[in-house]
């Protein structure tokens, strides 16, 4: 840029100032709060056999924007006004007076994650399973035996959830995988130390022995109740403080949020020793999300499966899972080759 | 009422901070955040573990970061933006000045009679500064800074209060080699007693006297302003309603007690200065290129 053009750009010429004043006068100043993100695929096409276009419109536009509109109404003029959704979830979780903000933000976040880990099936294939390659495919084979076994375990986890929620495929920083439920408006970002009643009930339905939780079990010792079962992950980094109040019945969504505790080590599994039926280590530390499914009735009822159509909904979910994105996420958070 | 609250906000701030501390303690107890944050760190291993856990948690926040809504930390206003995202001189508006509280002057009883042309009026015992005068004077000051910098001049930003230290430091950094700042205390005699302060060699061979001085709080630095006047250094300064605007050459009538106003004004002037530095460097580069071409054309062919 020449010095003349620098001078021209730098000086406030009358014409430029007037032009800017005119445009400012015409524009109605409004604070842009949360708005839904556009999906990476068109909504009009729907999601193959999983969700017809009207159902995808309902979930991606009506539900998502409705959640964000209600959140905007709550946060307008408060300290949460300028925060991103993730920051809103974390900060509202700390404040017992901000239950609704937490719930709306958490549901919006999880819904958005769910919509981004699916993609319409390609023209020449029934699903994206051919994109499942590399470390993730090997890990799934190691943990569950095959993709079909994994899908049936995941389906069992979804079936065992009586209430609304989300079921996640998670991994920890060593690359170990697990299936994790969050109930209601729970989130993976904030974890309680103790397992809630809902989590234990879910474990009982899915077929887990009831394992009691206690404070001293939070040291990272590897143990697992049953092979092939979704191991309950733990997050010592994000547990409740020592003097956490008892679960408040007025905040069911918060108490039913992700319960990451450690089961009592019924089978001690130290390195190099055969531990019998347990061949899985429990997830340790922070867990990262890879895949998510929405277990809400509005999803399968709206898509035309009927009120009891959860099983068929789950079966068709696998045809649209974007395994390429899941693999990329896995390589990003756990790139260590074992 | 609101204005007087703002003026006498020191006790209010103290009350708020104690309430906030008590509230924060209550919130902390109910928080479901890191247990590792509650325990005090005792050994280097504790600190390393804390850092690792924090890094893992931030990776988790990052994996969720792009989902949810279009609003991110980057495209919303954050409180630190007044310092780290300075307004360009062509973009400054009356609303920005009002939002930073630039129109609050001092008490009516303390108004300097020479300040009356810059006063809009009085409300609740406080002089309101007329920003319709302030804005063109601010733009004029920006032109002065740009002009001085475009001719290779050095500019010193003076802000000797705790909340002004960072703005003046960042303003000086923006102007590179031509920007300087005084954040702690202007040592008396810096200009008038420079031979003693810097030594005879430095005072003789190097340029100790700046080409422009900008004062964000002129009243505590009145001796510095006097020294600049004695050494014929042009001055720019934020003048409040209890100050005679004639103490500096280019007064900017505004609130000298507001941090936001000082950040806005120092940021704006330093952006103008940065443009001037760019102009100067470009002209230097062109001159060097022309000189090298002339030298090459004079050399005989080998």
Image: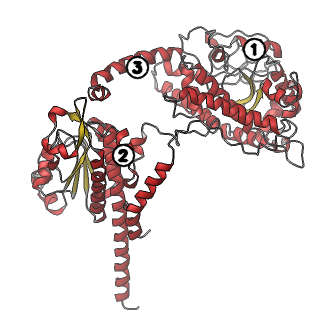
> Between residues B216 and A289, which one lies in front from this camera angle?
B216
> In the visual, does B210 lie left or right of B16?
left
Residue lying at 83% horizontally and 28% vertically, measured from the top left: A300
Disc 2 marks which residue?
Answer: B94
Disc 3 marks which residue?
Answer: B20
Instruction: Determine whether the residue tagged by mark 1 lies in a helix, strand or loop.
Output: loop
The first of marks 3 and 2 along the sequence is 3
> In the visual, does A227 lie left or right of B291?
right
Of tags 3 and 2, the one toward the viewer is 2
Question: Looking at the picture, how far across and down is residue A240, in whole percent?
Answer: 57, 16
Quarter of the image that includes the C terminus of chain A: top right
Residue lying at 55% horizontally and 16% vertically, measured from the top left: A96
Residue A80, label in figure: none
- The chain holding disc 1 is A
> Between residues A296 and B193, which one lies in front from this camera angle?
A296
Question: Looking at the picture, how far across and down is residue B231, in whole percent?
Answer: 12, 56
Whether residue A67 is situated above or below residue A229 in the rendered picture: below
Of tags 1 and 2, the one toward the viewer is 2
Disc 1 to disc 3, C-alpha distance: 47 Å
Within 10 Å of the Cα at label 2, are there few (<14), some (14-19), or many (20+) other Cα atoms? few
Disc 1 to disc 2, C-alpha distance: 70 Å
Disc 1 marks which residue?
Answer: A267
Q: Do callouts 1 and 3 mark residues in contact (Cβ within 8 Å)?
A: no
- The chain holding disc 2 is B
Residue lying at 12% horizontally and 50% vertically, measured from the top left: B227
Within 10 Å of the Cα at label 1, are there few (<14), some (14-19), or many (20+) other Cα atoms? some
Question: Looking at the picture, how far across and down is residue B134, in whole percent?
Answer: 28, 48
Instruction: Determine whether the residue tagged by mark 2 lies in a helix, strand or loop.
Output: helix
Residue A290: image quadrant is: top right
> In the visual, does A10 lie left or right of A336?
left
- The chain holding disc 3 is B
């Amino acid at each position: 840029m020449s010095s003349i053009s620098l001078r021209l750009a730098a000086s406030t010429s009358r014409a430029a100032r007037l032009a800017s004043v005119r445009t400012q006068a015409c524009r109605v100043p409004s604070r842009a709060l949360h708005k839904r993100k556009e999906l990476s695929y068109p909504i009009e096409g729907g999601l193959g056999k999983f969700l017809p276009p009207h159902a995808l419109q309902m979930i991606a536009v009506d539900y998502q924007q409705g959640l964000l509109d209600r959140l905007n109404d709550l946060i307008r003029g408060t300290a949460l006004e300028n925060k991103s959704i993730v920051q809103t979830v974390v900060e509202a979780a700390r404040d017992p007076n901000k239950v609704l903000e937490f719930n709306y933000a958490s549901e919006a976040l999880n819904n958005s994650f769910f919509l981004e880990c699916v993609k319409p099936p390609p023209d020449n294939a029934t699903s994206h399973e051919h994109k499942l390659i590399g470390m993730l495919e090997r890990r799934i084979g190691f943990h569950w035996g095959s993709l079909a076994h994994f899908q049936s375990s995941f389906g069992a986890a979804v079936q065992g959830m009586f209430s609304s929620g989300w079921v996640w495929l998670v991994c920890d920083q060593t690359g170990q995988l697990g299936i994790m439920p969050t109930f209601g408006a729970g989130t993976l970002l904030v974890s309680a130390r103790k397992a809630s009643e809902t989590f234990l009930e879910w474990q009982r339905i899915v077929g887990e022995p009831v394992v009691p939780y206690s404070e001293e079990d939070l040291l990272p010792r590897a143990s697992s109740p049953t092979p092939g079962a979704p191991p309950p992950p733990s997050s010592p980094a994000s547990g409740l403080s020592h003097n956490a109040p008892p679960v408040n019945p007025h905040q069911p969504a918060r108490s039913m949020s992700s319960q990451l505790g450690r089961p009592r080590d019924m089978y001690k599994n130290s390195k190099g020793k055969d531990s019998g039926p347990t061949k899985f280590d429990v997830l340790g530390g922070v867990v990262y999300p890879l895949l998510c499914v929405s277990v809400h009735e509005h999803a399968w009822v709206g898509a035309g499966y009927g009120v009891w159509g959860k099983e068929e909904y789950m079966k068709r979910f696998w045809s649209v899972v974007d395994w390429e994105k899941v693999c990329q996420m896995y390589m990003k958070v756990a790139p260590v080759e074992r | 009422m609101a204005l007087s609250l703002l003026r006498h906000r020191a006790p209010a701030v103290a009350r708020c901070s104690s309430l906030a501390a008590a509230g924060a303690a209550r919130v902390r107890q109910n928080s479901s955040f890191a247990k590792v944050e509650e325990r005090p760190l005792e050994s280097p291993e504790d600190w390393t573990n804390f850092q690792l856990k924090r890094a893992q948690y931030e990776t988790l926040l990052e994996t969720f970061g792009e989902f949810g809504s279009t609003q991110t930390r980057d495209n919303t206003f954050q409180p630190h933006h007044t310092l780290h995202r300075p307004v360009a001189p062509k973009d400054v508006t009356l609303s920005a000045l009002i939002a930073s509280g630039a129109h609050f002057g001092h008490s009516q009883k303390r108004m300097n009679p020479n300040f009356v042309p810059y006063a809009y009026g009085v409300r609740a015992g406080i002089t309101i500064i007329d920003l319709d005068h302030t804005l063109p004077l601010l733009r004029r000051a920006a032109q002065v800074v740009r002009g001085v910098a475009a001719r290779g001049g050095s500019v010193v930003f003076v802000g000797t209060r705790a909340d002004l230290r960072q703005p003046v430091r960042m303003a000086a950094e923006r102007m590179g080699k031509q920007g300087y700042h005084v954040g702690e205390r202007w040592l008396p005699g810096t200009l008038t007693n420079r031979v003693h302060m810097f030594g005879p060699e430095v005072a003789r061979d190097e340029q100790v006297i700046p080409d422009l001085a900008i004062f964000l709080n002129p009243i505590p630095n009145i001796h510095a302003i006097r020294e600049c006047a004695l050494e014929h250094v042009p001055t720019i300064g934020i003048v409040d309603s209890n100050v005679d605007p004639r103490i500096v050459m280019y007064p900017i009538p505004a609130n000298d007690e507001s941090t936001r106003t000082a950040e806005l004004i120092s940021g704006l002037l330093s952006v103008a200065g940065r443009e001037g530095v760019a102009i100067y460097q470009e002209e230097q580069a062109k001159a060097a290129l022309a000189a090298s071409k002339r030298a090459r054309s004079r050399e005989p062919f080998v």
